Amino acid sequence: MELRSGLRLLREHWLLITMVTAMAVAASGFATWSQTPQYASRVTFFISAWTDPNDTASAYQGSLLSEQKVKSYAELLRTRSVMDNVVDDLDLDLTPQQLADKVTTSVVPDTALLNATVTDPSPEAARRIARSIGREFATLVPSLENSSESRQAAVEVTVVNQAELPTHPVTPKPVRNLVLAAIIGLLAGFGIAVARRSLDTTIKSAEQLEHFTGVPTLGTIAADRKMAKTPLIVHDPHGFRAEDVRKIRTNLQFVDVDRPHKVILVSGSLPSEGKTTMACNLAIALAEAGKRVILVDADLRKPRAAGFLGLPNGTGLTDVLVGTVPLDAAAQSWGKDLLTVLSTGSTPPNPSELLGSRQMGELLDKLRASYDMVLIDGPPILHVADAVATAASCDGVLMVVRQGSTRREQLQEALDSLRNVKAPVLGTVLNFAPASNRKAYAYGYLAPQQPRRSEAKSH
């Protein structure tokens, strides 16, 4: 994983990683708190074989014998014979096997030293048992190694480090446990985040969107809590959302400059991606730039554009297409003649056939000749064929994609549907992107606050 990818993963899933880490630390803390502290006391033996002090070879052989013997004594120390003697010596309420489970042995490499460590919840008990093992084992070994014909024991066991009273528990170790839990939690959190990102096929960034579609991403619209109540940029003309729409307006004008694109369908793969809001705001931004703009609401199944603009949805597109109302009578002016709006009109029983009809193509040709820009708020491309039927008569399509919601496979299916009718996709807009930490527009100074006009006055 590259550093940039890792940092992006951390930024996108920091809450998940933090929660997993906190849960791991909390679980480790609870386990540590619930454990009974264990104290360890150690006794050290030195194993020496009898040698002739006047014979050098005998001394060397005795040293080798001691190193060999100490390995077998490590197992002998935990045998039943030693444990029985210790239980009897201290009058312990334990079986020899239970006592043996408290004892661990270790041999110091390349020496004749043997360690016996006793672990017990009581530090006093640990020391008493360790000292008793020291006495019993030091007595038992010579009796086993001494032959009846020799007065001198073949092997001698000497306690060189008497068991002391432990002052600190050996387990649990809170600091070590919590640090290890934090590390494991971080790794687990990153692992879950990686798995979640691998399984999550939604579009997450403008770069990912452009790489996947192969067409330019003309801009991003940041998520705004005020969008539900005030979706239009005229309510906050100096806000970040208004500037984002103006950037998209500018970028749209530079798409394939050799071929004019006057009739543009604004659509998306699925509902709730913000395509109607995008169409309305882009129409307003183009009109503010001096363009003659008409916005056509072609979402005949669920019209919303007229409602966003505060216009009645009486006669409109369907009435013009069937010839009951002329275009001039159905078109409405919005914002003191800032732009023209053609609402959907009556709901037809056959939206796809109507939008793909010859009359629709002729109407768009007429609008193309009368206006600088014709924006069509189309229905979602998937599930119904309305948008594809409309796109066949348009100069291009502007796709609106909702970050974290639109899946790659859904977007791919929508793009394939447009390619089947040879409708060019001019670009994409990433909607509901995370808001950046911008403070103010216009190079650091706050734009002057203008009194908000009511929507009724703006009409």
Image (cartoon, rainbow, N blue to C red):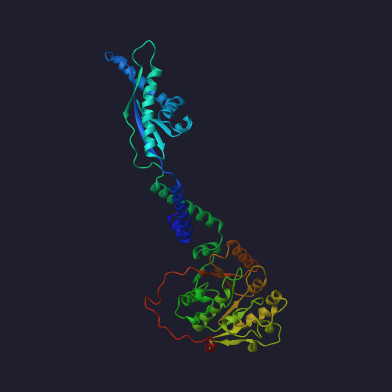
- Give the position of the C terminus as an image quadrant: bottom right
Q: Exactly how many numbered labels are in the figure?
A: 0
Farthest residue, direction top: 149
Looking at the picture, tell me which residue is in the foreground, 304 or 118. Answer: 118
Q: Residue at x 36, y 11 (%)?
A: 150
Q: Is residue 353 left or right of residue 128?
A: right
Looking at the picture, tell me which residue is in the foreground, 276 or 26. Answer: 26
* Residue 292 versus residue 211 in the image, above or below: below
**Can see residue 68?**
no
Q: Residue at x 45, y 77 (%)?
A: 239
Farthest residue, direction left: 54
User: Residue 346 appears at what percent x and percent y?
Assistant: 69, 82
Q: Residue at x 33, y 37 (%)?
A: 165
* Residue 207 versus residue 397 in the image, above or below: above
Q: Residue at x 52, y 80 (%)?
A: 232
* Residue 21 versus residue 374 in the image, above or below: above
User: Residue 32 appears at what percent x and percent y?
Assistant: 44, 47
Farthest residue, direction front: 91
Looking at the picture, tell me which residue is in the foreground, 65 or 259. Answer: 65
**Can see residue 195?**
yes
User: Residue 268 appears at what percent x and percent y?
Assistant: 59, 70
User: Residue 416 appears at what percent x and percent y?
Assistant: 62, 64
Looking at the picture, tell me which residue is in the foreground, 34 or 54. Answer: 34
Q: Is residue 257 left or right of residue 365?
A: left
